[in-house]
Image (cartoon, grey):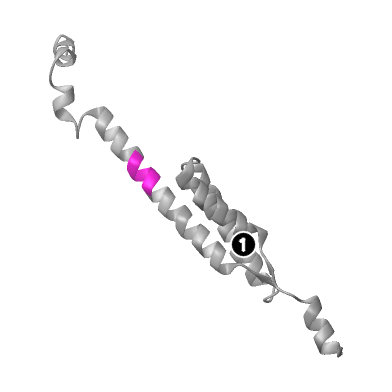
Amino acid sequence: MTENQEHQKNLEETTSLWAIFSLISGIANYVGLWFIGAIVAVITGYFAKNEIKKSNDRIGGEGLANVGLILGWVGIAVSILMACLIILIAVGVIGGSIALCGPFSDMINQIPLY
């Protein structure tokens, strides 16, 4: 075995654990850890990309980190949209007919405004 082959054997590429954790967190965001999984996926995805960049091609997993980042950012966007939708429904902007009919509207009309 030549010295170059031995050196190459010692520098085998490994997968970044941050990238694996980013992918798992991105998937967990859609399974049960809403929003928290997305935040963890984005943070660990950027850690993984930074680790891979600094390793000089000794650590792999950039594809896993990218997928984790995409899942994380999409999860954050969906969570924010859902929170806005819930707030609008609760305030009655979207479901206005619910807030303006029945005993609830009578109760609101009896509140003095002065």
The chief SS type of the magenta part is helix
Secondary structure of the residue carrying tag 1 is helix
* Residue shown at 57% from the left, 55% from the top: 22
Image position, residue 91 (x, y; %): 25, 28
Label 1 crowd (10 A; few <14 / some 14-19 / many >=20): many
Residue 73: quadrant of the picture: bottom left
Q: Mark 1 points at which residue?
A: 48
The answer to whether residue 25 is left or right of residue 12 is: left
* Amino acid type of the residue that numbered disc 1 sits on in the rendered structure: Ala
* Residue shown at 51% from the left, 42% from the top: 36
Which of the two residues, 61 or 108, is positioned nearer the viewer here? 61
Furthest-bottom residue in this view: 2
Q: Quadrant of the C terminus?
A: top left
The answer to whether residue 108 is left or right of residue 50 is: left
Q: Count the marks: how many?
A: 1
* Residue shown at 48% from the left, 53% from the top: 72
Q: In which quarter of the image is the N terminus?
A: bottom right
Furthest-front residue in this view: 1
Which of the two residues, 1 or 13, is positioned nearer the viewer here? 1
**Does residue 22 lie above or below 94 as drawn?**
below
**Does residue 55 lie above or below 79 as drawn?**
below
The answer to whether residue 113 is left or right of residue 47 is: left
Image position, residue 28 (x, y; %): 52, 47
**Does residue 43 lie above or below 5 as drawn?**
above
Which of the two residues, 23 or 105, is positioned nearer the viewer here? 23
**Does residue 107 lie above or below 53 as drawn?**
above
Image position, residue 35 (x, y; %): 47, 43
* Residue shown at 52% from the left, 58% from the top: 68
Q: Is residue 46 magenta?
A: no
The answer to whether residue 44 is left or right of residue 76 is: right
Residue bounds of the magenta highlight:
78-82
